[in-house]
Image (cartoon, rainbow, N blue to C red):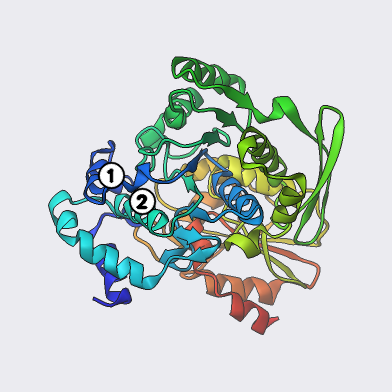
Amino acid sequence: MNYQQTIDYLYETLPMFSRVGSAAFKKDLTNTLLLCERLGNPHKKFKSIHVAGTNGKGSVSHMLAAVFQTSGFKTGLYTSPHLYDFRERIRVNGTMCDEDFIVDFVKRVKSSIEEIQPSFFEITVAMAFDYFVQQKVDIAIIEVGLGGRLDSTNVITPELSVITNIGWDHMNMLGNTLEEIAFEKAGIIKEKIPVVIGEKKTETEEVFRNIASQKNAPIYFAEDKFSIAGYKLLHDTIEISIDRNSTISDYKLDLAGIYQTKNILTVLQAVELLEKWKITQQNIQTALQSVKQLTGLHGRWEVINQEPTVILEVAHNKDGIEQMLSHVRKINFDRLHIIIGVVKDKDVEQVLELLPGNANYYFTQSHIPRALEATVLQSLASKLNLEGRNYDDVNTALQQALANASKNDLIIICGSIFLVAEVNKESVTQQT
């Protein structure tokens, strides 16, 4: 098989969460451990940092990877899902893994795939671990796929565990209370391994403290040591002043979303605990200015056009949408246009209830089986007095929004990672 045939084989043969939802989620680590055993247990052969959380885990993972790269370390990065290219999931020093490696890997494990019948995610985790060993990385940043306790990545023993925050998402699999969700995320806490909690919440603090105590794991809440002294939202960057023990440090971040003010505290606390790596303040400041360039991160308040401003934002749950709207309220524009598409297994009403009534809406859908039909989304929104037309394709919706917008308007595409992935960026600049 060539590369494209190999990718097609993985998509067609293995249950994939992004396409079919919870049916692809394996609620134990057996398959991952079996695959790793047959590969010589690669998960035991490299140093790592494990990152979980409802929102922010992708941004924090990429920021940490940028910091380690800038500090001179060969850095692996495993994240999911991808936006444009499968190989985005597995990077070393920001470069996507080799096509030839993927072809060779699948050839090597094809008999195990047929015997074990793993999920798509279980195979990609094993693939990433095998690649990081082959590439002899100094450290790898590993982002949890879903939850933590039963996530396929949870076979590693990291240098540090990080849990960014706890919010409402995947309740059908993780639990119907914040405490239950926190319990699942806290499953990445390991015996005597320090853990950073990015956000302190009354409902979840005790859960984390109890599990950390059971595991003899030192626990650190980022906001106990670090706080935001001030910030300035610029067009596609954010300048943040951080207070640590009354000492102010300034950072410029090329991830412009206001929610990055929370994520940066998590990153700073994590790096401080990794003192043996001798990462300098200059390393951190340099890295945070170029996260996108260093790691290839997309879709986090990503500005793809000006006049009108067009934003790609992968916010897709209650907390993510709240943070997005918080940013919107702090910037100047004339009219707001929201292009939105969601997946069926989200609490859609919970998201729609947050959206402003005075925006222009374009209801659409991504081209995956999990996508909620645009007509259904429009109908649900109409009951909440959110009015707009429906479109079969996000790019058709975007063309209409561009046609309706003046140069001082703001257009946001949000609601689903998979929707953002289908946006044709080149057609935006051509139309404007």
136 versus 407 height, above or below: above
Label 1: element kind:
helix
Q: Quadrant of the C terminus?
A: bottom right
The residue positioned 56% from the left and 55% from the top of the image is 314
Label 2: element kind:
helix
Relative to 157, 298 lies left or right: right
Circle 1 residue? 32
Residue 220 in percent (x, y) is at 62, 25
The disc label shown at residue 287, or none: none
Residue 137 in percent (x, y) is at 48, 54
Callout 1 environment at 10 Å: few (<14), some (14 to 19), or many (20+)?
A: many
Labels 1 and 2 touching (C-beta < 8 A): yes
Callout 2 environment at 10 Å: few (<14), some (14 to 19), or many (20+)?
A: many
Circle 2 residue? 125
* Towards the viewer: 172 or 217: 217
The residue positioned 46% from the left and 37% from the top of the image is 158
Residue 163 in percent (x, y) is at 54, 34
Q: How many marks?
A: 2
Relative to 266, 33 lies left or right: left
* Towards the viewer: 388 or 17: 17
Quadrant of residue 154 within the rendered picture: top left
* Towards the viewer: 28 or 135: 135
User: Distance from label 1 to label 2 (Cα)?
Assistant: 8 Å
Residue 426 in percent (x, y) is at 60, 79
311 versus 186 height, above or below: below
Q: Quadrant of the N terminus?
A: bottom left
Q: Is residue 271 visible?
A: yes
The residue positioned 69% from the left and 55% from the top of the image is 287
Q: Amino acid at mark 1?
A: Thr
Q: Amino acid at mark 2?
A: Val
Q: Earlier in the sequence, mark 1 or mark 2?
A: 1
44 versus 290 height, above or below: above
